Image (cartoon, helix red, strand yellow):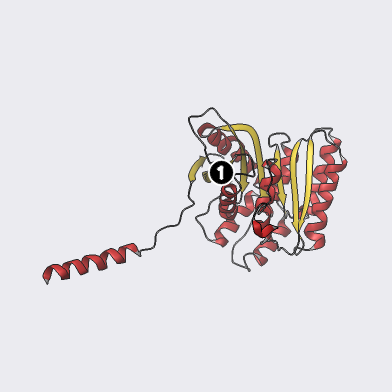
Amino acid sequence: MKKLFVLLVALATFSALAQSPQPATLFGAEAYDVPSKIMKSNIRVSVSVPMGYDAKSDKKYPVLYVLDAFYSFPLMHEMHKMMAGEIEPAIIVGIGDDRMSLPEWIISRYPVLNFDNVAYEDSFHVANLLRGAPVKLHSGDGAQYYNAIKTEVIPFIEANYKTSDDRGLTGHSLSSLFASHVMFKDPGYFSKIGINSAPLFVNDDETMRLEKAFFASKKKLSGKVFISASSLEGKNLFEKRALNLANALKSRNYPGLNVTHHVFQDESHVSEIGALTGKILYYFYGLPVDRSLGKGHKADK
C-alpha cells in the first residue's frame, strides 16, 4: 500500500511538472546582444539561417536585415522556412529588441528611426500611440543608429556567418522611412530595399526632396526596391505617396534598378505586415519555379 502511495505521488508530481509552462522559442533562430559603443547599449540581433546551412561550407548567402524585429523577425523567420522551395536560400537578420512591452518598444524605436528631429511628429506620437502618457519623444538619432548598424551589427554578422556582399534592408512604417533615407544617403551598400507603409509625409515629404536631390547629384541607384502601402491606411497619407516615390524612381531610368509597387487591398497599417512578408521575400529572392499547388490531383480536374 505504501509503495502504491509513493508511486501515485510520483506520478502526480511528474504530471504537474509536465504541465509547467515553458518559454516559447523560434526553432532554428539565434539571438545575440551586440555591444554598441555608438549607441552606448547593446543592440539585439536575431538570426535565421536557411535550411541546409553549413558553417563549415564555402557557400555564402545573401543577407536580409529586417528592422523592427520586435514583430517582423518572427514572421520573416517562419515564412523564410516555409518558402524554402520558392526562394533562394538567404540569411535573415532581425534588428531590434523583442523583450519589452509595446509602449517600451515605441519609446525606444522612435528616436533612432528618424534621421531628423520633427517636433510635431514627436508630440503626435505621444498623443496617439502612447495615448498621452507622461513621456517625451525626441526624434533625430537615425544617423547614429545607422552608423551602429553599419559599423557594429553588420560586421558582427559577417564575421560569424557565411555572408555574401548581397545585402538587403527592409522595414515597415517608421523603420521603412528609415530605409528610404538609407537608400539615398548610402547608395549601393544595400542591393535590396523594402519601403512598406512608410510615413513619407514626415518633415513635409522630406523623402521626396531627398529623391530629387539625389537625382540632381547624378549618383546612381541599382538593385531592387519594393514599395508598398495598404488600402485602409489613407489614400493621401500612405498610398499616394508610396506611388509617387515608386513612379519617381522608375522615371529616372537608373541602369540596373528594378522598382515594384504594390497596394495591399483591404489591409490596415498593421495587418499588412503579414501580407507583405511573403511578397517581399519572393520579390527579393524568388526562384523560377512552378509555385502552383494541386496540379495532377484528381480533384483538380
The image shows a total of numbered marks equal to 1
The one of 280 and 295 positioned closer to us in this rendering:
295
In the rendered image, residue 250, in percent from the top left (x then y), is placed at: 84, 42
Residue at the far top: name it: 58
Q: Is residue 132 above or below residue 146?
A: below
Residue at the far left: name it: 2
Residue at the far right: name it: 251
Q: Is residue 206 left or right of residue 124?
A: right
The one of 134 and 278 positioned closer to us in this rendering:
278
Q: Secondary structure at mark 1?
A: loop
Q: Is residue 117 left or right of residue 20?
A: right
Q: How many residues crowd around disc 1 within 10 Å: few (fewer than 14), some, or many (20 or more)?
A: some
Query: Is residue 288 at least partly visible in the picture?
Result: yes
In the rendered image, residue 188, in percent from the top left (x then y), is placed at: 72, 34
Quadrant location, the N terminus = bottom left
Name the residue type under label 1: Met
Which residue is identified by label 1? 39
In which quarter of the view is residue 272 placed?
bottom right
Quadrant location, the C terminus = bottom right
Q: Residue at x 33, y 62 (%)?
A: 18
Q: Is residue 104 left or right of residue 281?
A: left
Q: Residue at x 79, y 60 (%)?
A: 237
In the rendered image, residue 14, in percent from the top left (x then y), is placed at: 27, 63
Query: Is residue 114 at least partly visible in the picture?
Result: no
The one of 156 and 300 positioned closer to us in this rendering:
300
In the rendered image, residue 230, in percent from the top left (x then y), is placed at: 75, 59
